[in-house]
Image (spheres, helix red, strand yellow):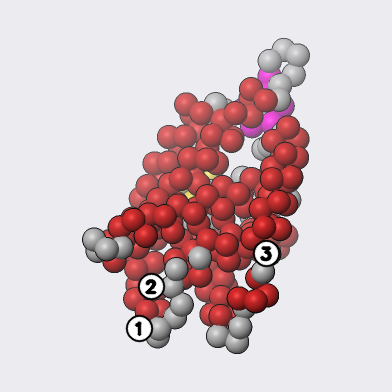
Amino acid sequence: MHIPDGFLSPQTYLPAYAVAAVAWWAAGRGLRARLDEHLVPRLAALTALVYAMGLVMLPLPGGTSVHAVGVALLALLFGARLAFLGYSLVLLLQSLLFGAGGITALPVNALAIGGAGALVAVGVFRALRAWHEDAAVLLATWCAVMVPAALVGLVLGLQPWLAQRADGTPLFFPFGPAVVLPAILAPHALLGLAEGALTVLVWRAARARRWQFT
């Protein structure tokens, strides 16, 4: 789901950096008061797990790939704010160490996956938890995959319109939403179900150890 460097126009990533900077600052406010000797190692362990999940790339036809997201796991266990910060760190490390994503694409990836994904996961879980907790975790995870995938697809699909040469040729990403959205959403719909099942298992293990929940 990562957007790599070179796919986004400056008209996209420069404003996104401004928005992301405000979001990172707001998410980090008062963070020191919340972190303690119990939360820090748990957050570090789960962030490392999410980092590893994102490195397993499943190839798809057309030369692209899909991978697990993991932001719902962080959001359901630690809240949307810590999930956003933790996933932003994951994205930064993946882009610097493995070339997954990129520096210019970092704010869009962070806002779409770490920000929107975390908020959606927490919202869906809280809305459905009273009905069935495991089902709420599964659906929250699925939505936390699909909503960022849709946002990423829309951002990519707008690039031909945002930046083009005088003859109308796109300067960056060449395909519109009609092509991008189905190509992104279809595989992630299946991925979201598999990731949801994994998240339920980790959720149960964490609950058995009385970890902190949202």
Residue 182 location (% of width, % of height): 43, 34
Q: Residue at x 51, y 65 (%)?
A: 79
The CA span between labels 2 and 3 is: 25 Å
Q: Which amino acid does the dot numbered 1 rest on?
A: Ala
67 relative position to 106: left or right: left
Q: Is residue 155 left or right of residue 74?
A: right
SS assignment at label 1: helix
| Element carrying mark 2 | helix
Q: Amino acid at mark 3?
A: Gly
In this picture, is 77 found above or below 65? below
- Which mark, residue 208? 1
Residue 47 position, x and y percent, is 56, 71
Residue 71: mark in rendering: none
Of discs 2 and 3, which sits in the foreground?
A: 3
> Which mark sits nearer the N-terminus, 1 or 2?
2
- State the separation of the CA atoms marked 3 and 1: 29 Å
Q: Which residue is mark 3?
A: 28
Q: Is residue 79 above or below residue 147?
A: below
Which residue is drawn at the image coordinates 37% and 79% (left, top)?
207
Magenta extent? 169-174
